[in-house]
Amino acid sequence: MRLLLIGVGGVGQSAAMLIKNAGKDGDWLEKMVLADYDLGRAQDVAKLCNDARFVAEKVNARDAETIKDLVKKHNITFIMNAVEPEFNECIFDTALELGVGYIDCAMTLSKRHPDKPYELTHIKLGDYQFAKNKEWEKKGCMAIVGSGVEPGVADVFAKYAAKHLFDEVDEVNVRDGDNYIVPGQDIAFGFSIWTTIEECLNPPIIWEKGRGWFTTESFSEPEIFDFPGGIGPVEVINVEHEEVLLVPRVIDCNRVTFKYGVPKEFRDMLKNLEALGMDSANRKIKVGDTEISPRDFLARVAPSPLETAKIMIGQGCAGTWVTGKKDGLYRSAYLYSVADNQECLAKYGTNSVVAQTALGPVIMLELVAKGLWSTPGVHGPESFEPDVFVDRMAKYGFPAGLQEKDSEYNRKLEESRLLEPIKSPKK
């Protein structure tokens, strides 16, 4: 595979380092062009990789012609989009025009319903991309959308659970929580500031069979979820996320939600920004001779996630909680992956949030390169065979875990273990 990576931020660097650290297992990659608007940033990551397969280039993600030039110059076969979702349409359409494969970590953006934003959907995440499915099929090319950790790995977990752990699926509930602490910082962004504001303040979306997709108030339906990996109980709330748009397209179930552990003080800060209009990505304010959106301004002045990552401690857990029936009994199971921030810094030079995000596309790209995932059209990760993905997670340093929650099926398992015959001690 000859890959053009557009965006060499935390996710882009993590993706390159995951492949580099895989050694011979990363031999599926023939070349990766590390392309960024900041050429110096791309060159720094290329030096960090210290591998002739990784080369740096400058790109403008808003300009299709500069993308086309790089695809032709390096004979690119696949494009990985690792920039903010506002650039998705340009990169996605350019890949389609050129007839090369495409993968992103977050789908095209939504737009609120003009009259009932907290009840009805309007333009949903990914609508722009799925509307072009037939064009991708006709061209014989594949686009994988929502390929990070959430969405991405979480979707694969949902497919794996439906295939192996359940006879009937009731709910698919993605749950994300952590115990991160940034010493000396009351408020810190662990991921892209721009994207965090977008997904946290947009009306959360839920899917139910018979009702379809609908929205609720921001930070609605708080619940306490007990996370593994030493994290423990965390309050999680509804947040707009791609899994809710992807999973019910493929997996037969009754309800799909996404909830994330956003601390109360962080929620208050976001609501205050919204009240002041500082969350806007569309309104422009003039500063000297330059126009900038309030959200872009915040992304410039707030503590950079790349900097706060260096001192952040703790673990983050991303996973999918599935309920339903197995062997006629109610089952509740959580499939997950835990990442430690300081360990990720040591391995990849990036924080655990972006390192986990890079895991999904890297494994998916390997599966594409080896012909194991290959279906023309626009697809989410739950559309493909999950076993080959889950089997590779440990190889890349993020093994999958399974936590049985309290259920009839789990209690039956425990009873069967207790009733195992007692073996005589060896003499």
Image (spheres, rainbow, N blue to C red):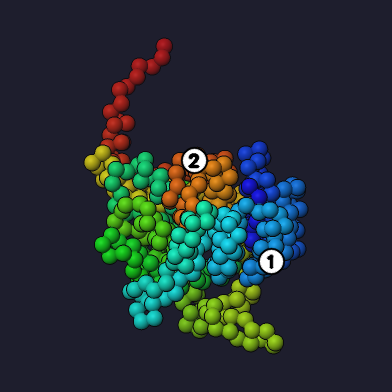
Q: Where is residue 297 in the image (x, y as percent from the top left)?
A: 61, 78
Under mark 2, the amino acid is Val
Under mark 1, the amino acid is Thr
Q: How far apart are marks 1 and 2 (CA)?
A: 35 Å
Please name the residue shown 45% across and 47% down the image.
Answer: 384
Which residue is labeled 2 in the image? 388
In depth, the one of 360 and 279 nearer the eye is 360
Can you name the residue that lies furthest to the front here? 138
Please tell me in which quadrant of the rendered image residue 186 appears.
bottom right
Q: Where is residue 223 in the image (x, y as percent from the top left)?
A: 35, 61
In depth, the one of 151 and 81 nearer the eye is 81
Which mark is in front, 1 or 2?
Answer: 1
| Image mark for residue 213 | none
Quarter placement of the C terminus: top left
Which residue is labeled 1 in the image? 66
Task: Say whether residue 240 is left or right of residue 170.
Answer: right
